[in-house]
Amino acid sequence: MAENVHSFRSMEVKRLVTALHINVDSLQEGINTFDIKKRQVKVMLNDGQVTFVGYHLFTDEMKAMLKTPILNFLERYFLQLDYPTIDRPRARMMHEDRFKFDIGSIQTVSSLKADDAFSFSLENNSYVATWSRNDHPVLSVSFPAVHELISGENKIESEDHVETDILLSPLDSVAPVNEALLMPTTQQDYFIKRGGTYFKDLFMSDLFYHRNDSSLSLVNDTSHPLESAANLMLSQESLIDCMLQVRQVMYGYKKKQFSVPLRNWIAYCLKTGCELYFGAEALDETNMKATIIAVNVAESYDHLLFVNIPMSVIETGKGDIDAQLETFIPMHNVNGLFAKYYKTDHKRQKIYLQ
């Protein structure tokens, strides 16, 4: 294998490509398909890196419509079950991963048809995925919503990819705000687009707007620092052009420093299915200390971004924001992580437009 030419997204991708005897030098950028033992296998090459390998079960159109990581997971995991390792045979793999065939078996996968109906649900941090034919289920599997299982990457691999994934995240075009979604406030010409709350209501995803003449725009002024900071950290609509100076805290107490545009960080979070929440901690005339939580329900993890936002960033529309980032934290561990940073009597600012 030409390892000097191609790299691999994870050790598991490399193992599967090796087990399938795929010549990586033959791969073209994008999706490559192979017929292996009468099954169609897809291999994705992205900028010289092999990022995915799995059975061809779902169309690109279905993936674009459903926007869930479990489709890639199912394609890869069924392939893994057909090509287990000696030290982790199929039965052990399924037991350790808590993956179950509730209807059918691994042999049923090869009999699936393109027009079989597919559905999935997520409840209590567990997925159920079902294929049906003529309104009768032919295959149903269940598995936990765990990032390492669904991504096929261990925590070290996922953390190592964060900087590159942020930089490569495309910025979405932003549609005009729907005025029907805005609520008036006690301040004339100021409005709130209500979002949700997280972690004992200490964090919120509200956005704040101001009407100037006949147009609406996000609040961005030093007379409304909290609202402006929330808009800055939660929305790609913000016109502020600034950089995050990130100190990433990684597994094994490692630390990594890098710089990325704030907009790319937001785009990365949204692209990977995270919802962003903002909580202010402290504010003075020159600086605001705040925490942003990126919540990924589909894979049951959070990212935590602790930031110091200079008031000059809001005032001038440019500058640097110092940030500490911890990634892929299992949701059940978030309480403990907050205890690591905050005293139990800590109070967050909750002074927003009303």
Image: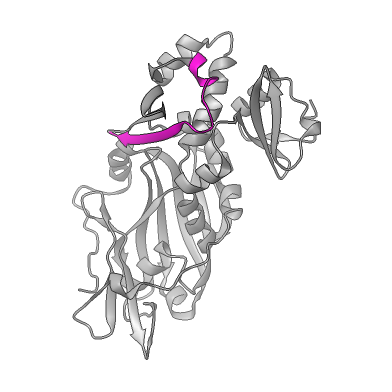
Is residue 174 visible to us here? yes
**Quarter of the N terminus within the rendering:** top right
Point out the stretch of residues depicted in magenta: 106-123
Q: Is residue 117 magenta?
A: yes
Residue 99 percent across, percent down from the top left: 41, 20
Residue 168 percent across, percent down from the top left: 61, 53
Report whether 51 appears left or right of 194: right
**Quarter of the C terminus within the rendering:** bottom left
Residue 18 percent across, percent down from the top left: 70, 21
Q: Residue at x 56, y 34 (%)?
A: 157
Q: Judge by depth and name the residue closer to the eye, 134 or 48.
A: 134
Colour theme: one colour
Q: Judge by depth and name the residue closer to the eye, 295 or 314.
A: 295
Residue 26 percent across, percent down from the top left: 80, 32
Placement of 7 over or under 269, stated as above or below? above
Is residue 252 visible to us here? no
Total numbered badges shown on the rendered structure: 0
Placement of 211 over or under 17, stated as above or below? below
Q: Is residue 340 magenta?
A: no
Placement of 109 over or under 184, stated as above or below? above
Q: Residue at x 51, y 51 (%)?
A: 247
Report whether 342 appears left or right of 134: left
Where, by quadrant of the figure, is residue 278 drawn? bottom left
Name the residue furthest bottom. 213
Report whether 125 appears left or right of 175: left
